[in-house]
């Protein structure tokens, strides 16, 4: 077994789908007790729990809470400590992101930016602090899920890019501020993942257009990101701290005009 998380507790915000759920499943497969936080949508808690039980893992603790609401977080931690009997949180994975899509410069507003920061950047700070207040110590591992938005242009992604940049900077400074507590903090970026939420945001046309330019291997799988997150918390990479790690199979280097040119003979868009 690569890593053993028996008797370890992992709290994942936004953990009922995509990267969050894949991360929870992998931690649970390796023995961890996972706490999954969600807010948006009507989640089928039984179906989610069944996915864990089918592989012989502990059923997750599912809790509905708004990550930007301090009272919700306090209610969650009180439940975990008093009702669930947990003594500590070993790993925090901050995965929630919520930002408006921008279509033009006129869409920019300070109010919308502040809301995006509250949901997409600040929870990694607020959850860490409130976990310490409740349990007397920070999680040893704090992982914030980011994207390549801060480094690469994506249509409509302005606020996501803004807030992920803020979050990544906070992670670097957290790593320094908390190193005396022996806390390790990282941000994990991912290239595009073909999910329902991505389709809801950008529409099916994006996937149809992309098929003419990139192979299916372009899309990162949630399980790949989960593997990187779990490895960072395995103890094998404790010499690293405050890192921004990109999960992209190397495409950030070669996914450009020259790559399209070298593959032009196989691209439908050039053979119509």
Image (tube, grey):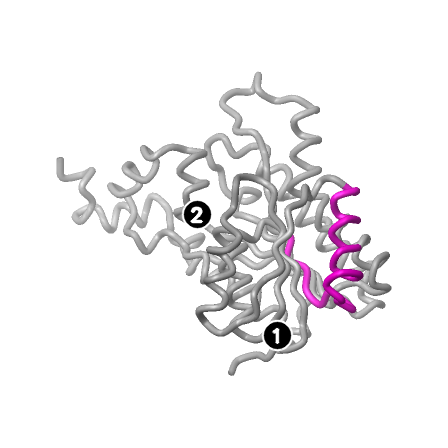
Pair 2/1: label in front: 1
Residue 247 screen position, x and y as percent: 49, 58
* Residue found at x 65% / y 21%: 109
Q: Position of residue 220 (x, y in %)?
A: 41, 55
* Neighbour tally class for label 1: few under 14, some 14-19, many 20 plus, Cα within 10 Å: some
54 magenta-colored = no
- Residue 145 drawn at (x, y percent): 59, 52
> Where are the magenta residues, as a range?
70-94
Q: Is residue 220 left or right of residue 263?
A: right
Query: Which residue is denoted by mark 1 in the rendering?
Result: 234
Q: Quadrant of residue 257?
A: top left
Q: Secondary structure at mark 1?
A: loop
Q: Residue at x 61, y 55 (%)?
A: 62
Instruction: Give the labeled residue for mark 2.
Output: 192
210 and 6: which is toward the camera: 6
Residue 105: percent from the left, percent from the top? Answer: 56, 20
In the picture, measured across the screen, residue 201 lies left or right of residue 172, that is: left
Task: Give the spatial CA distance, label 2 vs label 1.
Answer: 25 Å
Position of 143 compared to 259: left or right? right
Q: Tag 2, which secondary structure?
A: loop
């Amino acid at each position: 077994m690569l890593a053993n998380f028996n008797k370890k507790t992992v709290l994942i915000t936004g953990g009922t789908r995509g990267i969050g759920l894949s991360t929870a499943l992998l931690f649970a497969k390796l023995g961890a007790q996972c706490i999954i936080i969600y807010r948006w949508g009507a989640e089928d808690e039984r179906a989610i729990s069944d996915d864990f039980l089918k592989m012989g893992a502990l059923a997750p603790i599912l809790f509905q809470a708004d990550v930007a609401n301090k009272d919700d977080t306090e209610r969650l931690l009180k439940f975990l400590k008093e009702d669930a009997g947990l003594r500590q949180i070993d790993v925090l994975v901050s995965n929630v992101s919520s930002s408006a899509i921008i279509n033009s410069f006129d869409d920019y507003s300070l109010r919308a930016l502040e809301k995006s920061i509250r949901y997409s950047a600040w929870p990694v700070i607020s959850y860490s602090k409130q976990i310490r207040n409740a349990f007397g110590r920070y999680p040893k591992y704090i992982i914030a899920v980011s994207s390549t938005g801060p480094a690469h242009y994506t249509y409509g992604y302005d606020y996501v890019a803004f807030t992920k940049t803020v979050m990544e900077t906070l992670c670097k400074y957290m790593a320094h501020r908390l190193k005396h507590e022996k806390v390790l903090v990282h941000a994990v970026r991912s290239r595009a993942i073909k999910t329902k939420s991505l389709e809801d945001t950008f529409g099916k046309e994006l996937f149809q257009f992309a098929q003419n330019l990139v192979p299916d291997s372009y899309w990162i799988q949630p399980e790949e990101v989960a593997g990187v997150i779990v490895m960072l918390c395995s103890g094998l990479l404790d010499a690293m701290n405050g890192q921004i790690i990109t999960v992209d199979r190397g495409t950030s280097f070669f996914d450009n005009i020259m790559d399209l040119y070298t593959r032009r003979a196989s691209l439908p868009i050039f053979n119509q």
